[in-house]
Amino acid sequence: MTWLITGGAGYIGGHVVRQLLDAGEKVAVLDDLSTGDPSRLPAEVALVKGSTLDGAAVRAAIREHGVDGVLHFAAKKQVGESVERPFLYYRENMLGLQTVLEACAAEGVRRFLFSSSASVYGMPDVDLVTERTPCAPMNPYGETKLAGEWLVRSAGRAHGINTASLRYFNVAGAGAPELADTGVFNLVPMVFECLTTGRAPQVFGADYPTPDGTCVRDYIHVSDVASAHVAAARRLAEGRPGETALTLNIGRGEGVSVREMLALIGEVTGRDTTPVIAPRRPGDPARVVASAEAIRRELGWRARYDVTDMVASAWEGWCHHHPEALGA
Ligand code: WQD
């Protein structure tokens, strides 16, 4: 099978490219390199530099590489920015998705995997979030992921495409230092940046109704996210076209608080991670932890890595990209 990976030069897409190659699949990448980095890609991978908004370019890439399936990662992913710039998020995330789906329908591509997010759930008031927990996104980013899932499912049904929407919880870690996340938008890299620049890490709110007062999340190693995609891609490849439409959480089912994460980062890095307590960040839910039952049942997939693996590999990746961190 040959897979076209949009956003394949990005953090998660780059990991999926490597694992698909290791699994013996053929891969081509479409990326506009707005945030992606071609150095994440092995030399043998064909890179088409282009936008998902350019339907002719997507169709040409599908034809040129004999694509059987698409894994669609290309998207904007900063929650705060999405509140400031909803048009940008709907254009890139919704219109970009629609353009790629239309190209698939027109070119007879029969498998499609979509990067969704736990942000579709908003503020879930449950201990473990299942795929049946009501969706109520709280920001334009989450809206584009939920509406994107609807479009993926409808397009699959109308055009005989096997589809999967995979809802990632809090992705962290790196499968290799050069593949690490270079953005500083999430807890782990934000703490690393503080450690590198000699500032105390911040805890955004310590008065939540959780055991230690800080927010609880389900952190998942990016290599586990990637292996879930390989399992889902195989599943879509096996089924008769149009017969499969999966919506699955990718999480571990284990809640970890911000304070626990800071303590672990201190242990792994050998640095002082004593935080300052800052005000709550608007829109942060107290607890978001996945039920990982459905993906285990459907795909036989399980996470292999724990939070220590995530922090240790993320720190190695951070030091690879920020050598000054080692002397800080
Ligand atoms: C985790 C916890 C913060 C930084 C977001 C998106 C989600 C997904 C992943 C995808 C929160 C706290 C953070 C810091 C802190 N997006 N925190 N100090 O908000 O759970 O999820 O990213 O592409 O859709 O919503 O992730 O890593 O920002 O925060 O206390 O310096 O850490 O308040 O409780 P979040 P996060």
Image (cartoon, grey):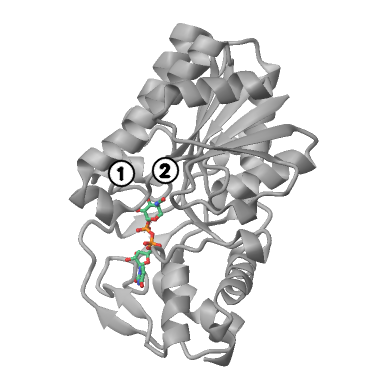
Indicate if the residue with disc 2 has its beta carbon within 8 Å of ligand 1.
Answer: yes
* The disc label shown at residue 141, or none: 1
The quarter of the picture where residue 292 lies is top right
- Say if disc 1 is inside 8 Å of ligand 1: yes
Q: Rounded to the nearest whole Å, what is the CA distance between mark 2 and mark 1?
A: 9 Å
Q: Secondary structure at mark 1?
A: helix
Q: Residues within 10 Å of mark 1 (few under 14, many from 20)?
A: many
Which quadrant holds residue 237? top right
Disc with the residue nearer the chain's start (2 vs 1): 2
Placement of the N terminus among the 4 image quadrants: top right
Up-down relation of residue 278 to residue 189 (above or below): below
Left of 98 or right of it: where is 66? right
The amino acid sitting under disc 2 is: Ser
Tag 2–tag 1 contact (CB < 8 Å): yes
Please name the residue shown 62% across and 58% down the image.
179
Q: Position of residue 100 (x, y in %)?
A: 46, 25
From the viewer's perspective, tell me whether residue 171 is left or right of residue 309.
left
Residue drawn where x is 26% and y is 41% of the image: 88
- Report the front residue among 157 and 159: 159
Question: Does residue 222 lie above or below 165 as drawn?
Answer: below
Residue that numbered label 2 is attached to: 117
Please name which of the two marks, 2 or 1, marks the residue nearer to the observer. 1
- Say whether residue 124 is left or right of residue 293: left
Residue 110 image offset from top left, x and y in percent? 59, 15
